[in-house]
């Protein structure tokens, strides 16, 4: 191997700092990287300024004092800072012009690409611009420095641009429905900047919950500080329930979340908040959380219903003012009339009572279709006990309780009715095997047949008449009461709505993205469909009669009271469903995807007025629910082209 010539100087990194009077301080290492050496020296000189006034950095005798590439980059940063100081809505052209000037100075300026992405006309172009920004940021930093600074890229000069690009890429990917890619991009961002997970953690947590990627959600909850806000404890409660169901760990997580901020539950459930007292900050925090995460709660089947059913018991465990002191004697849970009621079970043997061989009694204990909301509690469906004489067409006995009663207690009610009426029917009909066994045990030897039936004619018709009288609303009509809607059509509508809800199309398409549908049967007009649910306010499908109707609604808005004519298929909880629709679901076994996915269809006359649909409206909505879900899975947004459904509807992006 040839020896190095002694006359050839070995290249060394400059390690000198020039001071006034041509004094040199040696031994100060100067980085070889081209990234901001001038800025680093300026910072060093500023630090020494107090001790050595007038000190100035020097790169060394062999190199230029300020490489041209660095000066251009700094000049580009000045232009980007000026663009960021402008309002994007009012100065879109100016911002774009400044960003392009910055890129002409330095093509590797990531933040200049981010400004262009912010001004992109659509989400697909925004994704492309953020992709360019990421590549530019990685080129500027270089693979070596990027690997060394992994986990703290935000502290490296120039790393802020790369982090901004990756944050924007996560939001843009999720906006066009590429949620899995957005989650992966967000996880990579956390690896680059683990010291600041709050910048992307909350939005990434919502995406992970929506996709039911529980391992990712748990990882995010572990890296985000508990003190960041309410989204960590409430997110942990949602993740525990979503992955494990109603288990003790989920209830314990919910209890901890309620202790942090109990108002979040009311905001998620849509209850009117109690604004008395000094609770402004807590209410504001709850509303902010709800706006960001209600869609995630709706995306976890049964989560909202679980919260509604559990919140009262959890709140009851929290300390309250005016609670009885410890050791106070609790009141008896049994009413004062319990002892006389049990005494009424005693008396002469039942077989000695006269028997009416033409009479049949119907006995049932069922949950009522109507909801009752007591003060300070969540709406609940009470349980009714009914003993009805079929031949006499009257109620022998009845009662209502908020909780389900035991079969033995209902059988005791039957015995009381027998003694009160002082006669025996020929038979008793029930629908529940457990109740039949309990009644047989109470009236053994009384000579009364206890028969199991699929339905109880008298009780069913009586409850339906009461429900129609109390639950009718002028602008809403039960599905089976719509003219032209048969039992099979109602079942098909529920099945299509359930499939649509399980597909969660609001995760695949941005807000207010129109889908044009035409063709199919001769009576199907050209319509425009819009998927709802991206913001977590209301999940469903809006079907506008024509594109002009949608444009008019966008132009004048709801305040104008015009536009928006069409259909709306909305999903809600059981307590938001018409009583007769709820009764039909239970009686006929209609398919429902989740406790929060009871479908309802209405026809929109104006932005503020609705009326019941027609039979053809129900059929059109059924076809579109199936077609839109399949179209979104088959044709990604931005790919162009059209798609034809099995029923003949042709769908395309507008």
Image (cartoon, helix red, strand yellow):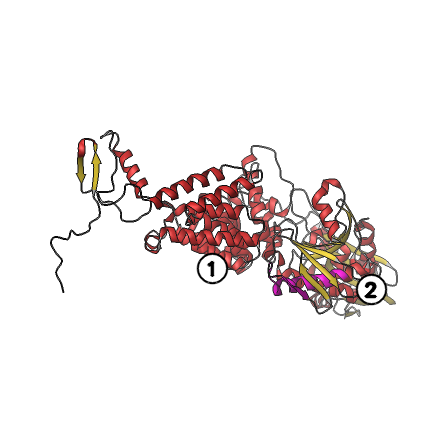
Q: Is residue 567 left or right of residue 393?
A: left
Instruction: Look at mark 2 in the image and give the residue it sits on.
Output: 457
Residue drawn at x 39%, y 44% as measured from the top left: 73
Q: Is residue 38 above or below residue 628?
A: above
Instruction: Reply yes or no: does residue 120 show up in magenta.
Output: no
Crowd band around label 1 with a 10 angstrom C-alpha radius: few (<14), some (14–19), many (20+):
few
Which dot, 1 or 2, sits closer to the camera?
1
Q: Is residue 459 left or right of residue 595?
A: right
Q: Is residue 122 left or right of residue 22?
A: right
SS class of the residue under badge 1?
helix
**Magenta stretch?**
620-643
Instruction: Look at mark 1 in the image and give the residue it sits on.
Output: 215
Residue 376 x %, y %: 65, 42
The C terminus: image quadrant: bottom right
SS class of the residue under badge 2?
helix
Of the image marks 1 and 2, the number of the one nearer the N terminus: 1
The N terminus: image quadrant: bottom left
Q: Nearer the viewer, residue 333 or 162?
A: 162
């Amino acid at each position: 191997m040839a020896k190095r010539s002694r006359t050839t100087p070995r290249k060394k990194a400059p390690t000198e700092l020039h001071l006034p009077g041509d004094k040199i301080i040696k031994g100060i290492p100067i980085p070889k990287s081209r990234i901001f050496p001038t800025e680093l020296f300026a910072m060093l000189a500023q630090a020494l300024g107090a001790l050595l006034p007038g000190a100035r950095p020097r790169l060394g005798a062999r190199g230029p004092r300020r490489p041209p590439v660095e000066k251009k980059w700094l000049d580009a940063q000045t232009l980007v800072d000026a663009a960021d100081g402008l309002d994007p809505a009012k100065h879109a052209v100016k911002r774009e012009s400044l960003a392009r000037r910055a890129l002409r100075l330095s093509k590797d300026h990531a933040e200049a690409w981010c400004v262009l992405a912010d001004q992109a006309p659509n989400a697909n172009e925004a994704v492309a611009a953020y992709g360019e920004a990421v590549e530019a940021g990685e080129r500027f930093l270089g693979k070596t420095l990027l690997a060394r600074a992994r986990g703290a890229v935000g502290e490296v000069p120039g790393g802020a641009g790369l982090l901004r690009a990756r944050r924007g890429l996560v939001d843009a990917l999720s906006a066009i429905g590429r949620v899995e890619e957005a989650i992966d991009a967000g996880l990579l961002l956390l690896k680059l900047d683990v010291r600041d997970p709050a910048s992307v953690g909350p939005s990434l947590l919502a995406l992970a919950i929506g996709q039911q990627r529980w391992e990712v959600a748990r990882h995010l909850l572990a890296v985000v500080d508990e003190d960041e806000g309410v989204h960590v404890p409430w997110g942990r409660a949602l993740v525990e329930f979503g992955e494990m169901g109603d288990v003790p760990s989920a209830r314990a997580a919910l209890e901890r979340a309620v202790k942090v901020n109990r108002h979040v539950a009311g905001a998620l459930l849509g209850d009117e908040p109690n604004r008395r007292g000094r609770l402004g900050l807590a209410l504001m925090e709850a509303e902010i959380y709800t706006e960001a995460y209600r869609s995630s709660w709706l995306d976890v089947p049964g989560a909202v219903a679980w919260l509604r059913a559990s919140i009262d018991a959890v709140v009851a465990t929290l300390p309250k003012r005016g609670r009885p002191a410890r050791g106070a004697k609790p009141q008896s849970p049994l009413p004062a009339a319990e002892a006389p009621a049990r005494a009424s079970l005693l008396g002469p043997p039942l077989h000695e009572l006269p028997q009416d061989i033409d009479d049949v009694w119907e006995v049932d204990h069922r949950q009522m279709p109507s909801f009752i909301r007591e003060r300070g509690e969540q709406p609940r469906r009470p349980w009714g006990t009914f003993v009805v004489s079929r031949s006499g067409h009257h109620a022998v006995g009845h009662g209502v309780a908020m909780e389900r009663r035991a079969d033995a207690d209902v059988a005791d009610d039957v015995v009381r009715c027998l003694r009160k009426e002082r006669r025996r029917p020929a038979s008793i009909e029930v629908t529940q095997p457990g109740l039949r066994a309990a009644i047989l045990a109470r009236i053994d030897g009384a000579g009364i047949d206890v028969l199991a039936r699929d339905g109880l004619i008298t009780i069913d018709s009586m409850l339906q008449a009461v429900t129609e009288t109390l639950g009718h609303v002028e602008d809403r009509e039960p599905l089976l009461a719509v003219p032209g809607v048969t039992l099979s059509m109602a079942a098909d509508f529920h099945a299509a709505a359930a499939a649509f809800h399980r597909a969660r199309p609001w995760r695949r398409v941005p807000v207010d993205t129109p889908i044009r549908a035409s063709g199919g049967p001769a009576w199907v007009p050209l319509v425009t469909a819009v998927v709802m649910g991206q913001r977590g306010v209301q999940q469903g499908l809006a079907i506008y009669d024509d594109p002009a109707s949608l444009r008019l609604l966008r132009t004048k808005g709801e305040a104008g009271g015009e536009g928006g004519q069409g259909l709306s298929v909305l999903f809600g909880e059981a307590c938001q469903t018409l009583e007769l629709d709820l009764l039909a679901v239970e009686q006929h076994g209609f398919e429902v995807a989740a406790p929060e996915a009871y479908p309802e269809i209405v026809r929109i006359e104006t932005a503020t007025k609705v009326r019941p649909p027609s039979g053809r409206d129900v059929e059109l909505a059924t076809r579109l629910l199936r077609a839109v879900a399949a179209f979104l899975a088959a044709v990604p947004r931005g790919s162009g082209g059209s798609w034809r459904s099995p029923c003949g509807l042709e769908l395309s992006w507008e």
